[in-house]
Image (cartoon, helix red, strand yellow):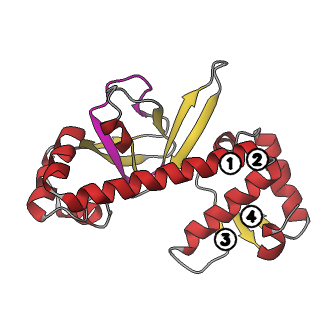
Amino acid sequence: MEPHPLYQKILRDHHLFSALNDTQLKQLLNESQLINLEKGDYIFRQGEPCHHFCFIVSGSVKIYRLTPDGQEKVFEVLGAHQTFAEAMMFMGQGCYVATAQAVLPTQLLMISNTAYTHLLRINPDASMALLAELSTRIHQRLNDIEILSLKNATHRVIRYILSQVLRACAHCNTDSFELPVAKRLVASHLSIQPETFSRIIHHLSDEGIIRVEGRLICILDRDRLESYE
């Protein structure tokens, strides 16, 4: 694609690309594809050949696999200026291990694995940035495993609420956030039923710990939420 200055700036602000010089960034964009998706469109499906990883310009994407009984298991729901599938560059099998689907109208850049790995070989700072990103993803997966194996449904929901507020605080000082996707997708990510998720949210609201207004959740008593049994 033609390296429009807007996309150069957006990528420059992401740590996976910040170490690239202008020439390298333009080269990468020249070998990338800009695609626009409607809600429900697939980016790739599990088992398809993996030639790209993705940068979300706007919108939201869910990453999931199907269980043997045909149910979706959502691993991640990602938003604007996040990347996904970059680990596939180094896994050797050459196929996507999960399915990626837009949950909102979405624009994203499909970035060539070949072009990016070439830049990694000549730019050690970019290599270190990628290692940091993959290490963070591993840490997140370990946290997910701990929550799913050691915590009951209520504690999973509470951890989710606290993590979303922490993410919101990175942009502004707030104790509230808006659910980024439908409740059923959040419930799938937490391995609970949608009805269970709604029941826990309503219970915490009735206790005066949180306030719920549509998809907006506001923490009213953080101490009680963090120590809730």
Using the numbered discs, state the Cα–Cα distance from disc 4 to disc 1 in whole angstroms.
30 Å
Instruction: Give, as a three-letter code, the residue at label 1.
Output: Glu
Camera-side mark, 2 or 4: 2
Instruction: Name the residue tied to disc 1.
Output: 146
Q: Which residues are magenta?
A: 42-60
Instruction: Give, as a three-letter code, the residue at label 3.
Output: Ser
Camera-side mark, 4 or 1: 1
Q: In the drawing, what numbered circle is on residue 213? A: 4
Instruction: Give, as a three-letter code, the residue at label 2.
Output: Leu
Camera-side mark, 3 or 1: 1
Quarter of image, res 195 = top right
Where in the figure is residue 21, as x and y percent of width and height? 13, 64
Using the numbered discs, state the Cα–Cα distance from disc 4 to disc 3 in whole angstroms.
11 Å
Identify the residue at image location x=85%, y=62%: 204
**Disc 2 element:** helix
Contact, mark 1 vs mark 2 (Cβ under 8 Å): yes
| Residue 117 visible somewhere in the drawing | yes
Question: Crowding near pointer 3: few (<14 within 10 Å), some, many (20+)?
Answer: many
